[in-house]
């Protein structure tokens, strides 16, 4: 049997996928943009908001907010993404803003798959900018940081070997970890970086523990010899504290599994629930406090009692860290 190739004909039209956004931005009055979530009262005191505000003041709005038309209300739009940017524009007295208009009325989180820049990447950006003549004061003004902080970020990788930088370059490693690695010799830096990545733990606490366990001959500045002055009383106190800590760990381990299971089930249910735009609008009008908490749970990427050192330590330019 000979093979027949099916060719598209006029009777078989090809269907192109629908565009998710209009081809051009639309100028919208800020007063006509309706948020789908309520920002916390303390959000304007956060570093993230201050960085966004400083960036807009210095270089303007880089990323347009995403909106979708309100059915039956011409000129009015629901705000899908860019809540902090809109708040900053209101504080700056702006009356209009260019927006991306979505053609689908959904509530998919625009930051669900956001890749935050690492400390190494931010260092490279700052180094490149300063090599091209941009001053620390100018960068600090645009990023909402002090010139001293910019200079610290500029010197972040001084004393760190290239292999360790390569290992940690694409991770969310806190900047303070590099300050601890700098106290080690290159081979120990590589070993410490591999241990942290292998344990999937890039916290400052682990880096401190690795530094404390580093032999003196593997330190950049060897430790001074100190006579042993540990008394029997100190050893007994440490043993008691260790026993108490082990009991606490055992108690946590018993509850950890069921708690994670319950949270996973709840998170999955709320994620599906908030994918329904009608449900989100109803909650926004009638139970905004519930909507805020539901969104917080649905957007969890780690347990709420986990370490957040990496968030506080990384430098994230305001124009790229939209809420």
Image (spheres, rainbow, N blue to C red):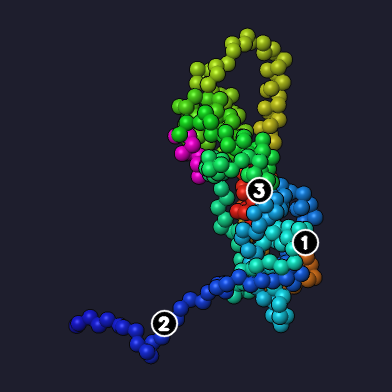
The residue at the point 80 percent across, 70 percent down is 286
Instruction: Report which residue position mark 1 lands on.
Output: 93
- Tell me residue 276's x, y (percent): 65, 72
Magenta stretch: give its range. 163-170
Position of the C terminus by quadrant: bottom right
Q: Horizontally, is 212 left or right of 247 in the view?
A: left
Give the camera-side residue of 170 and 268. 170
Secondary structure category for the residue under label 2? loop
- Look at the image and say whether residue 128 sits in the magenta stretch: no
Instruction: Report which residue position mark 3 lands on.
Output: 142
Give the camera-side residue of 148 and 243. 148
- Tell me residue 139's x, y (percent): 63, 44
Q: Horizontally, is 44 left or right of 200 in the view?
A: right
The residue at the point 71 percent across, 24 percent down is 240
Residue at mark 2 to residue at mark 1: CA–CA distance: 48 Å
The residue at the point 60 percent across, 37 percent down is 153
Rendering quarter of residue 183: top right
Viewer-side label of 2, 1: 1
Residue at mark 3 to residue at mark 2: CA–CA distance: 48 Å
Give the camera-side residue of 211 and 221. 221
């Amino acid at each position: 049997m000979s093979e027949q190739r099916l060719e598209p004909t006029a009777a078989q039209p090809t269907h192109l996928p629908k565009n998710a956004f209009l081809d051009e931005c639309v100028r919208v009055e800020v007063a006509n943009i309706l948020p789908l979530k309520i920002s916390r009262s303390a959000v304007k005191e956060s570093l993230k908001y201050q960085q966004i505000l400083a960036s807009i003041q210095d270089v303007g709005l880089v990323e347009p907010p995403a909106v979708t038309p309100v059915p039956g209300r011409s000129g009015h739009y629901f705000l899908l993404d860019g809540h902090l940017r809109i708040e900053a524009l209101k504080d700056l007295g702006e009356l209009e803003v260019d927006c991306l208009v979505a053609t689908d009325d959904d509530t998919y989180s625009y930051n669900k798959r956001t890749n935050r820049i690492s400390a190494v990447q931010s260092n490279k950006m700052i180094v490149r900018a300063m090599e091209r003549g941009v001053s620390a004061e100018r960068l600090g003004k645009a990023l909402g940081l002090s010139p001293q902080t910019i200079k610290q970020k500029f010197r972040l990788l001084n004393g760190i070997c290239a292999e360790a930088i390569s290992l940690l370059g694409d991770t969310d490693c806190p900047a303070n970890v590099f300050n601890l690695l700098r106290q080690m010799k290159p081979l120990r830096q590589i070993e410490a970086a591999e241990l942290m990545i292998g344990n999937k733990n890039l916290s400052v606490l682990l880096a401190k523990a690795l530094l404390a366990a580093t032999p003196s001959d593997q330190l950049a500045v060897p430790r001074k010899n100190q006579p042993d002055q540990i008394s029997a009383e100190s050893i007994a106190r440490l043993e008691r504290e260790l026993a108490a800590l082990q009991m606490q760990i055992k108690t946590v381990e018993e509850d950890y599994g069921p708690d994670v299971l319950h949270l996973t089930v709840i998170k999955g249910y709320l994620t599906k629930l908030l994918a329904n735009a009608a449900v989100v609008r109803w909650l926004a009008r009638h139970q905004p406090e519930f909507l805020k908490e539901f969104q917080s749970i649905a957007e969890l990427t780690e347990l709420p009692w986990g370490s957040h050192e990496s968030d506080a330590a990384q430098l994230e330019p305001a124009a790229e860290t939209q809420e």
